[in-house]
Amino acid sequence: MENTLIEKQLKAAADLNRIKLLACMKNGEVCVCDFVDVLGISQPAVSQHLRKLKEAGIITERKVGTWKHYRLVEDQTPLMKGILEQIQPLKGCNCGTDCCHVGGNIIE
Amino acid sequence: MENTLIEKQLKAAADLNRIKLLACMKNGEVCVCDFVDVLGISQPAVSQHLRKLKEAGIITERKVGTWKHYRLVEDQTPLMKGILEQIQPLKGCNCGTDCCHVGGNIIE
DNA sequence: TCCTTATATAATTATTTGCTTATATATTAT
DNA sequence: ATAATATATAAGCAAATAATTATATAAGGA
């Protein structure tokens, strides 16, 4: 892996709020609205954090109606595999059966 | 490992100049004067980078006369073990037999 | 169609970070 | 003691980052 990608992924992960986002996503998909409560920051701030993680190739998204569900990509780089292993999953923030006040958070 | 330590170590590692410092130290000890040439930044800037790595518990130092030799700590956290594995050693920057214009860079 | 809801983008501001220059400290040599 | 060398710390500044508020876009329901 090149140093510039290493730097990009490290920078993306090196923020407490984004670490929490990753911790949430370890349990599965999460939608933006839920993150707002978890982090206590504004919705645009959450969107910007998610964009940074997405641009680093760490997460991906899926549109579900008006909502957007984010999740970790399956193929993590060796670097991110190691980092994600050290982040404890954070319960109670990911999409449940009534995520976004509708049902169904299963990836088709 | 706690999230705050994870964040501290990620932040310390998430900088291209500090990645290069770590890449140098993968080959062994390095002294501050050598880093200045490698990175093309001032001596105080190098000192500040090294301090950040030290405060994150990633590197340690050893005084040799007027000089200071820096090296990776032996006991890395699982997080740092994984990260360091992904950084390619950078040759030609670490202390050689005539490091700092004296001899002897062996750790006693 | 219009209104509401969920998210993204833009513009702005505040905070943090990384650099520089200047100065301080410590060790060695004269 | 004084001078020279290596490194650290302090102060100041510029660039990058993370937050906010305001606005835009897109989908769903009345």
Image (spheres, coloured by chain):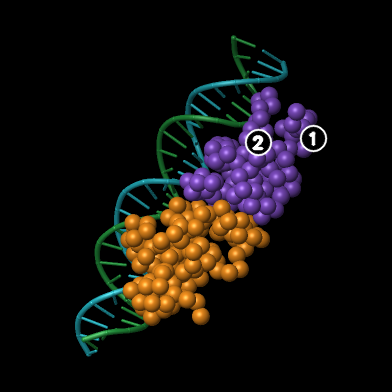
Chain colours: A purple, B orange, C green, D cyan
- Residue shown at 70% from the left, 37% from the top: A29
Q: Chain of mark 1?
A: A
Q: Chain of mark 2?
A: A
Crowding around mark 1 (Cα neighbors within 10 Å: few <14, some 14 to 19, many 20+) is: few
Q: Amino acid at mark 2?
A: Tyr
- The tag earlier along the polypeptide, 1 or 2, is 2
Disc 1 target residue: A97
Quarter of the figure with residue A47: top right
Disc 2 target residue: A70
Quarter of the figure with residue B63: bottom left
Q: Nearer the viewer, residue A34 or A2?
A: A2
Q: Nearer the viewer, residue C28 or B95?
A: B95
- Residue shown at 54% from the left, 46% from the top: A1
- Residue shown at 71% from the left, 50% from the top: A89
Residue B18 seen anywhere in this rendered image of the structure = no
Q: Is residue D15 left or right of residue A44?
A: left
